[in-house]
Image (tube, rainbow, N blue to C red):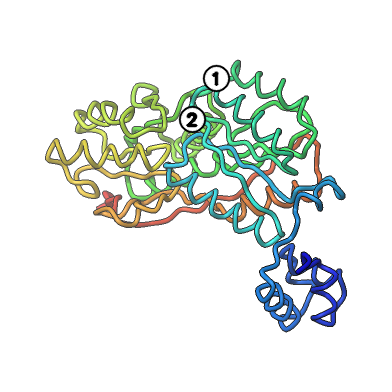
Amino acid sequence: MARITIKDIAKECGVSITAVSFVLNGKTDSVSKETRQRVLDVCNKYHYHPNYIASALKSKLTHTAAVLVPDIENGYYARLIKSLESSFVKNGYSLFIANSGYDIELFKKTIADMIIKNIDFLIVVPPSSFSNNQLLDIKSLEKDIDVPVVILDRKIDIENAPIVVNDDIKGGYLATKYLLEKGHKKIACITGPKEISSSQDRLLGYKKALSEWGVEFDDSIVYEGDYHFDGAFPLAKEILKDNSITAIFAFNDLMAYSIYKSASEMNKVVGKDISVVGFDDNQFSSLITPGLTTIKQNIDSLCSSVINELFNNQKIKKTILIEPTLVERRSVSDVNN
């Protein structure tokens, strides 16, 4: 039997070739549910699979996108990927997922590998460990990329690419304000790398809240972390030695978890002897005891903005801020009374 074509599918279904194309490309809003099911039934009947190679040669589109993240095991990035993939699938696209690690050469190679696959869109999440000088390499690569690119989760001075980030100043402000409202005055914090935009902005929010409440900023209780559990663990132990510190703001949940472990080893109870606020709202933050009060990053809104910028081919320099919210659990005690 000759290979069945999209024209044959349309004829048997009694619909247009365009309608069949909409169904096969995931554009389900353009056809009725009945038409979609009829097309899928006929495709299954003949074991029909679209010839995407021929389609790509004709349209110069592969209906594929790629997202590059530094650590796929990180819960935040995992949720980010899941939301992005869902959005792309709804628009008829497949998503390549690449784990770049924290090595600049591997990062550059991975971008080059993705471009060779003739992707239509590229989303880049730069690792927090990269210095601003290393990011110049990304800027130079961007000049050679002729597909729409969005930089996600980190502010970079880069031309022809929109940047979508969480409003980290507001997030830092909300976390610190919450602790101040609960009566805490000596609030230590464990930052990310100080030259990273997210860390800088969260610290600005921390300082803003302290200033509004008339609490003097104390640089001696600000500890530079690296956004990793192991890196924050000795810092948490150092902070917990000072009994005058009643609360800690960790700039991500992974570092907050290290405070829990340190406190346990030092016979201290989170939510009683020391209060903790994190940032990200990772999946484990509601499962640990006590549940971690944290700043929730709106990942769905983040990804929706990314999709909008890519599909509108917005090759212009701009920064889009996504609003965070505070999730209250049990890791903070009220010391007002």
**Neighbourhood count class around disc 2 (C-alpha, 10 Å): few under 14, some 14–19, many 20 upward:** some
Q: In the drawing, what numbered circle is on residue 101?
A: 2
Residue at left offset 38%, top offset 37%? 250
Q: Residue 162 placed where, x, y %?
A: 73, 38
Q: Residue 105 placed where, x, y %?
A: 56, 20
In this orientation, which residue lies closer to the viewer: 207 or 263? 263
Q: In the drawing, what numbered circle is on residue 131?
A: 1
Residue at left offset 66%, top offset 24%? 138
Furthest-left residue in this view: 267
Three-letter residue code for mark 1: Ser
* SS of the residue under disc 1: loop
Three-letter residue code for mark 2: Gly
Lower position in the chain sequence, tag 1 or tag 2: 2
Viewed as shown, does residue 115 lie left or right of 264? Answer: right
Residue 13 picture quarter = bottom right
Vertical comparison of 79 with 162: above or below? below
User: How many numbered circles are shown?
Assistant: 2
Vertical comparison of 203 with 73: above or below? above
Residue 25 picture quarter = bottom right
